[in-house]
Amino acid sequence: MAGSKPTGQVEREGARVLLLSPDGRLLVLRGHDPHLPSRSWWFTPGGGVEGSETVREAASRELAEETGFVVEPDVLIGPVWERTAYFDFKSRPYVQHEYFFVARLPDAAVLPSGPSAWTADEEETIDEIAWLTRRELEHASIEVFPDQLRESWDVFTGWDGRIISLGAVHE
């Protein structure tokens, strides 16, 4: 039928960035699914790999699109974590194999751009951009994805070169 959207499961690779400010805060986004507006959560900048780009290139692109911060792919540390996330978005099931990279800002953390660079989906789903401390994430009143952001900050203080598997999660 013309104009109808596919409803099958989407399987894709994804890339996310754990961006740290000079004072040790983590950049996170608060968003929601437009089909479930009463449920919101904190999450890291990132998204699906497009075309022939690498996961590292996708992480860099997504960070710039969602936050305005430009971090070149070769500056990203990692991937430090990997996981497979099962979730629904706009009533459509997704299976996303994600790779997480770390980046550190050398200067004061100020957002250089905002929603003007967002895609239509991002405009519809992102409610807030914030720099949060570990304690703030540990005590967040809404869900945090991935949940390890509440407790596993070892990758921020020094990475030993191993990719840590966070396993498969249903969100």
Image: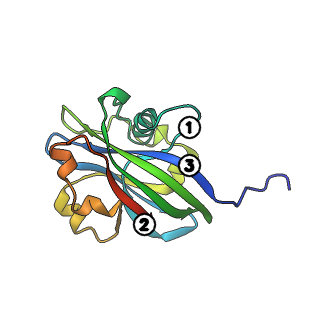
How packed is label 2: few (under 14 Cα within 10 Å), some, or many (20 or more)? Answer: some
Element under label 3?
Answer: strand
Which quadrant is home to the N terminus?
A: bottom right
Residue located beneath label 3 in the image: 12
Which-is-in-front pick, marks 2 and 3?
Answer: 3
Q: Which mark is residue 50?
A: 1
- Dot 1: element: loop
Q: Nearer the viewer, residue 143 or 73?
A: 73
Q: Where residue 81 appears, x then y in whole percent? A: 33, 50
- Label 2 to label 1, Cα distance in Å? 26 Å
| Residues at marks 2 and 1 touching, judged by CB atoms closer than 8 Å | no
Residue under label 2, please give it.
40
Dot 1 amino acid type? Glu
In space, the residues marked 3 and 1 are separated at their CA atoms by 9 Å
**Of marks 2 and 1, the one in the foreground:** 1
Residue 33 visible in image: no
Q: Which mark is residue 80?
A: none
Sequence-first disc among 3 and 1: 3
Is residue 153 positioned above or below 136 on the image?
Answer: above
Name the residue furthest right. Answer: 1
Q: Is residue 102 above or below residue 128?
A: above
Three-letter residue code for mark 3 = Arg
Q: Where is 7 relative to 161, above or below?
A: below
- Along the line of sight, which residue is nearer the eye, 65 or 151? 151
Residue plotted at (34% across, 27% down): 74
Image coordinates for residue 162, horizontal then vertical, percent: 27, 44
Residue that protrudes farthest toward the front in the picture: 162
Is 107 situated left or right of 165 in this image? left
Category of crowding for the residue at label 1, using alpha-carbon neighbours closer than 10 angstroms: few (below 14), some (14–19), many (at least 20): some
* Number of marks present in the image shown: 3
Q: Residue 155 in the image: x percent, y percent?
A: 21, 48
